Image: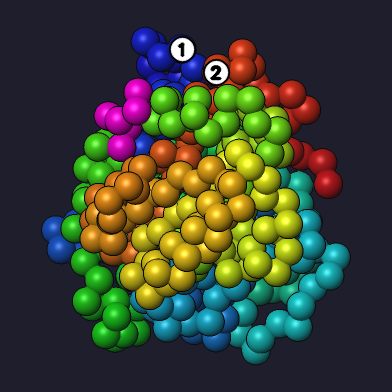
Amino acid sequence: QETEKGAYPYYMLKEVSEQPAVMRRLLRRYTKGASLQFDVKLLAALKDADQLYIVAAGTSYHAGLVGQALFEQLAGVRTTAFLASEFAYHQPLLSQKPFFIFLTQSGETADLRQVLVQINAKNLPSLTMTNVLTATLAREATFALDLAAGPEIAVASTKAYTAQVALEALLAKALGAAKGQAAAKAFDVEHELSLAATGQQALIDQQSAIHELAKEMFATTRNAFFIGRGTDYYVSLESALKLKEISYVQAEGFAAGELKHGTIALIEPGTPVVAIITDPTTAARTRSNAEEVEARGGKVLRIVAESLAEPGDDLIVPALNPLLSPLLTIVPAQLLAYYTSLDRGYDVDRPRNLAKSVTVE
Ligand code: G6P
């Protein structure tokens, strides 16, 4: 039964463990032979747009940030992710031909609905990517796509995040191909997503080692930082959110280069900092930021792509196109959060003060 825990102590661990299967399910759902299967009307509407506006909240917003890079680089279309609660009341100037993408696990988040009502009133085109196709946001948008992650029960979102990133990649590839973009042609999304599934499994298989790292890093700490650049920065934001949601550690994600502009003042002997390093363009710079933390007594855990690994790195993630690295780097971060919450004796699946679906603004 998809909605039962089975042998898992918590839904969160079950859902983290399901991610490789979700990647494969999305591939089956959206590919046929060598071609991608998307509604021709949806692709035509996207092709017609001069800018994509991704609107989301929480974890889904963090997946939307990764989507910016995917749509810009693969499909050559200007793309910006917005927090729904901000966009609703402080709308930026819209482009001539905007297209809206609502990213939402539940399909019911009130902050997003507020935006959708406004853009429907202006007759602007939209797509909802959701795990619940019968939900309000799916019904009220012009188009809807299924995240196919299966029911997500734990309050902390895990497999919906990776499903969102993977589905954005599939759609960005399809759009880029329809527009004749060279970058899309060179990006073998099916191959990359099956590599992602295998890589995720390899990381899940290291859960006892990750549990040890969680103890070393976060057992008693009151705060923690995650740093990275580019998509590694976006994963840092999501990693910090996971940790704070379920373990109540005050965790923050930062752009690694910004550390020296303020956050480094918070580093004391023993402060835990996780550095995520998967982008060859910035790897050396993030490494030196991590060393600055260590020079001030901070305790650094390095999560590094295989091709960039150096002796002493703590966790190596398998090779994957850097655009999709969040599909891998988030897995150890999810597990670090899970074990920290578990070891501190909290109810992992039902953190205090939080709801799975937030239907008030
Ligand atoms: C709630 C949940 C978060 C989720 C956010 C957005 O705050 O606790 O895990 O990321 O809502 O939800 P959505 O269903 O729109 O993705």
Q: Toward the viewer: 30 or 55?
A: 55
Name the spot of residue 281 as percent of width and height, x first.
38, 75
Name the spot of residue 64 as percent of width and height, x first.
55, 60
Tell whether 195 sits left or right of 64. Answer: left
Residue at position x 30%, y 41% from top? 200
Q: How is the image coloured?
A: rainbow
Tell whether 354 sits left or right of 334. Answer: right
- In the image, residue 298 above or below residue 210: below
Badge 2 marks a residue whose secondary structure is helix
Residue at position x 76%, y 66% from top? 87
Q: Toward the viewer: 45 or 68?
A: 68
Residue pointed to by mark 2:
342
Q: Magenta stretch? A: 203-209
Query: Marks 1 and 2: in contact by CB < 8 Å?
Result: yes
Closer to the chain start, of discs 2 and 1, is 1
Cβ of mark 1 under 8 Å from ligand 1: the answer is no
Q: Residue furthest bottom?
A: 96
Q: Nearer the viewer, mark 2 or mark 1?
A: 2
Cβ of mark 2 under 8 Å from ligand 1: the answer is no
Judge whether residue 262 is colored magenta: no
Q: What secondary structure is the stretch in magenta mostly built from?
A: helix
Residue 148 image-quadrant placement: top left
**Which label number is shown at residue 9?**
1
Q: Residues within 10 Å of mark 1 (few under 14, many from 20)?
A: few
Residue at position x 48%, y 53% from top? 275
- In the image, residue 281 above or below residue 302: below
Residue 320: tell me if it is visible.
Answer: no
Badge 1 marks a residue whose secondary structure is loop
Judge whether residue 206 is colored magenta: yes
Residue at position x 35%, y 53% from top? 304
Tell whether 104 sits left or right of 189. Answer: right
Q: Residue furthest left?
A: 33
